[in-house]
Amino acid sequence: MSTTPAAPSASPPAASAPPVAAHSITAPAATSQRELHSLYRRVPNLGDYGSMTAIEERWILPKARAYETSAPRFGSPGELLQALKEFLAEEEASLPESATFLAEHATLDQFKVVVRQFALDGLTESESLLPVVPRLPYRSAMAVFRVLIDELGCGNEEKAHSQLYRDLLTELGMSLRLDDYLDETTPECFAYVNMFHWLASRAPSPQYFLGAYAYFETSVLYAFQSFARAARRLGITHDAYYTEHLYIDSYHSSHMRTAIRSLEEPDLAKIWAGVRLASDIVGTATEAAVARARETVA
């Protein structure tokens, strides 16, 4: 699938793109996020489809359009990837205080709250991403598929990332049933899960996915450090869910850059919108998860 390429011109630094403010999800939207998650888990009828579309129009489409409109005028995929590198470096250099709290101070009970908040994602990791493959041009799709193969353990269920999360949950004495987490997941963490489904299956262009996942696979290399450090400090044996990401995602990052470079007609504004969208939603979800841990555990 191809779209119109961006007009060539010099690329300003990543930080110069006007920001779209990240914020907590309001009460009406909170209900919508849970409803959307439910809709994404089943084959929708006509009424479901209308509800799904209405929620997306209120939530994620305005964000995507705003980031696309404010995207720098990149002249080539190489310029975009350089801007992504700079954006990631700035983000890594200014990690929020919550990362330090999680790595150095969170108790075991507080860590379990954070693990619980991401269980909807961890128990189903990458399953919702598979539909993006046939939506992409062949060479780009194959680069993405190589990433997804790793995510699914190369067919070895013991190595699948979702199984690594199950191992973590089991050690922590927590449920392996997805439905047991529905009532306690924050709306921001529902949005985190819903974003991946939207990017793969529902976004008007799969190029949003390419930007978002290129960001995600690289940002994990620093974002998961606090999780891995907390697990090690707390004596958790089954920490492979975090350490495996710190090992394998450098390869995945390379594959995602290949997927972007392989596009014959890249829409660089949409790819950049995907970068900013993922940064916004992932960051907001992580902050919400740590805040929930601090609020609910003495």
Image (cartoon, rainbow, N blue to C red):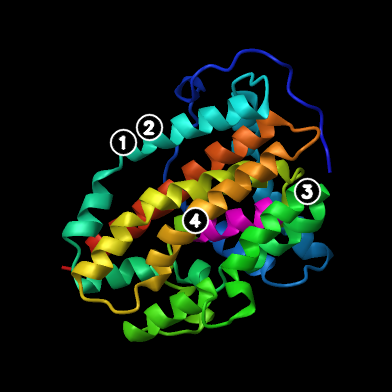
Q: Secondary structure at mark 1?
A: helix
N-terminal of the two: label 3 or label 1?
1
Q: Is residue 158 above or below residue 87?
A: below
Q: Measure the C-alpha gap from mark 4 to mark 3.
A: 20 Å
Instruction: Point out the stretch of residues depicted in magenta.
Output: 190-200
**Dots 2 and 3: beta carbons under 8 Å?**
no
N-terminal of the two: label 4 or label 2?
2
Task: Examine the image and state in which quarter residue 295 appears.
Answer: bottom left
Amino acid type indicated by mark 2: Glu
- Measuring 53% from the left and 28% from the top, which residue is drawn there? 82
Residue 102, x across and y down, in percent: 24, 58
Residue 117, x across and y down, in percent: 40, 66
Is 266 on the left-hand or right-hand side of 118?
right
**Residue bearing mark 3:** 139
Tell which of 77 and 165 is nearer to you. Answer: 77
**Residue bearing mark 1:** 93
Q: Residues within 10 Å of mark 2 (few under 14, many from 20)?
A: few
Residue 136, x across and y down, in percent: 79, 49
Q: Secondary structure at mark 4?
A: helix
Q: Measure the C-alpha gap from mark 4 to mark 2.
A: 19 Å
- Measuring 77% from the left and 44% from the top, which residue is drawn there? 204
- Measuring 49% from the left and 73% from the top, which residue is drawn there? 182
Name the quarter where the N terminus is drawn: top right
**Dots 2 and 1: beta carbons under 8 Å?**
yes
Tell which of 260 and 100 is nearer to you. Answer: 260
Q: Residues within 10 Å of mark 4 (few under 14, many from 20)?
A: many
Q: Is residue 72 above or below residue 203?
A: above
Amino acid type indicated by mark 1: Ala
**Residue bearing mark 2:** 90
Q: Please tell me the numbered disc located at residue 249.
A: 4
Q: Measure the C-alpha gap from mark 2 to mark 3.
A: 30 Å
